[in-house]
Image (tube, rainbow, N blue to C red):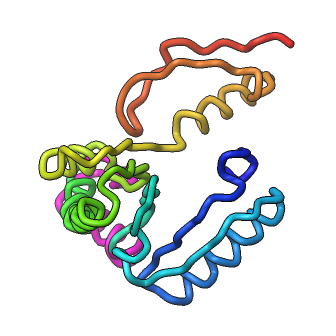
Amino acid sequence: MFHREALKSAHVALMDIDQTRLEESHIVVRKLMDSAGASGRITCHTNQKAALQDADFVVVAFQIGGYEPCTVTDFEVCKRHGLEQTIADTLGPGGIMRALRTIPHLWRICEDMTEVCPKATMLNYVNPMAMNTWAMYARYPHIKQVGLCHSVQGTAEELARDLNIDPASLRYRCAGINHMAFYLELDAQNG
């Protein structure tokens, strides 16, 4: 993102409840900015409302409970009852449990956004995407939000490699919801 001229001088406010992870994230973001020749400012916060103050965009990426124990438990409970659960971040019993853990935290972010950055747009990378965006819209319809996932461009790159096509030459149009998208058009551009 720091290669974009408009973002080279951006203020990036990092927030984490874990001070160690926050410091590690700061190091990574600083190196990314430096490598892109960006002069932006980075601030670190353990207080969510302080991090959100006057934000234009709010990028959300977290997992409540972590892979262990929460995601592993979701798999084990399903297995114990004869259900095969895939990654458990989209739908099915595991996805529902993940949503129940996650949605209250997203609502708290929306509440703080309403107070300190009501015009900001949330760029949400938190799964289960469909349930999360639905729940936020149901309670906070005034919050501008976009649910995002890397699976569309990631799958396009995999298809390009499988077909021996330069991924940069692909142009596509996709529709669907998170982890259930379909390519309506997929073309390789010459030149």
Where on the picture, by quarter, is residue 22? Answer: bottom right
Extent of the magenta region = 65-91
Kindly tell me whether residue 103 is visible in this rendering. Answer: yes
Residue 33 location in percent, x, y?
Answer: 75, 63
Where on the picture, by quarter, is residue 80? Answer: bottom left
Is 76 a magenta residue?
yes
Quarter occupied by the C terminus:
top right
Residue lying at the far right of the rendered structure? 191
Residue lying at the far bottom of the rendered structure? 19
Where on the picture, by quarter, is residue 113? Answer: bottom left
Residue 158 location in percent, x, y?
Answer: 66, 34
Residue 101 location in percent, x, y?
Answer: 23, 67
Residue 185 location in percent, x, y?
Answer: 55, 12
Q: Residue at x 63, y 81 (%)?
A: 24
Looking at the picture, tell me which residue is in the foreground, 109 or 162: 109
Q: Residue at x 13, y 46 (%)?
A: 138
Q: Residue at x 53, y 34 (%)?
A: 152
Looking at the picture, tell me which residue is in the foreground, 31 or 63: 31
Is 148 a magenta residue?
no
**In the rendered image, the vertical position of residue 55 relative to residue 7, given as above or below:** below
Residue 92 falls left or right of residue 59 = left
**In the rendered image, the vertical position of residue 186 relative to residue 21, given as above or below:** above
Looking at the picture, tell me which residue is in the foreground, 184 or 85: 184
Q: Residue at x 38, y 42 (%)?
A: 146
Kindly tell me whether residue 78 is visible in this rendering. Answer: no
**In the rendered image, the vertical position of residue 23 relative to residue 117, given as above or below:** below
Residue 67 falls left or right of residue 115 = right
Looking at the picture, tell me which residue is in the foreground, 127 or 146: 146
